[in-house]
Amino acid sequence: MNKHRSDELGVATAGCAIGMGSALFTCVLLYLNGSFVLAVISALNRAGDNWLKDEKVAQCVLFLVPVILVVIEWMMIDYIRTRFVRRAR
């Protein structure tokens, strides 16, 4: 009976670790995506694009595009994981 309780604790700890790892990985992806989008916005401003001169539009792009990219990246990760990793039976 005592072994069963320690097994549950191990499963809960593993689940918590996976959740924290996923959150940390998502934060890293958001940071990289935000840096990429900021670099693209700066390059387009130097190139003379007028539609990004408006601060409201630039801020909207800077906040929305990295989040959209993270969702797309996680969808790609899930697709690759389900495609190449065999299910345990």
Image (cartoon, rainbow, N blue to C red):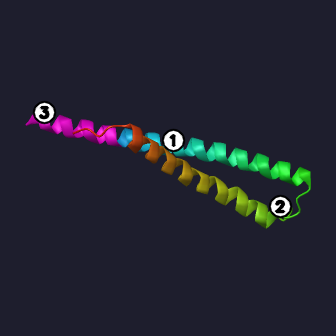
Q: Position of residue 15 (x, y in %)?
A: 33, 42
Which of the pair 80/19 is nearer the observer? Answer: 80
Q: Residue at x 72, y 60 (%)?
A: 61
- In the image, what residue type sits under mark 1? Leu
The answer to whether residue 41 is left or right of residue 32 is: right
- In the image, what residue type sits under mark 3? Lys
Q: Which residue is mark 2?
A: 52
Q: Does the magenta run of residues contain 89?
A: no
Q: Which residues are magenta?
A: 1-15
> What is the magenta segment's predominant secondary structure?
helix
Secondary structure beneath dot 2 equals: loop
Q: Position of residue 71 (x, y in %)?
A: 54, 54
Q: Position of residue 66 (x, y in %)?
A: 64, 53
Instruction: Residue 27: name its quadrant.
Output: top right
The answer to whether residue 13 is left or right of residue 26 is: left
Q: Which residue is mark 1?
A: 24
- In the image, what residue type sits under mark 2? Leu
Marks 3, 2: nearer the viewer:
2
Q: Which mark is residue 3?
A: 3
| Mark sitting earlier along the chain (1/2) | 1
Q: Residue furthest front?
A: 83
Quadrant including the N terminus: top left
| Mark sitting earlier along the chain (1/3) | 3
Marks 1, 3: nearer the viewer:
1
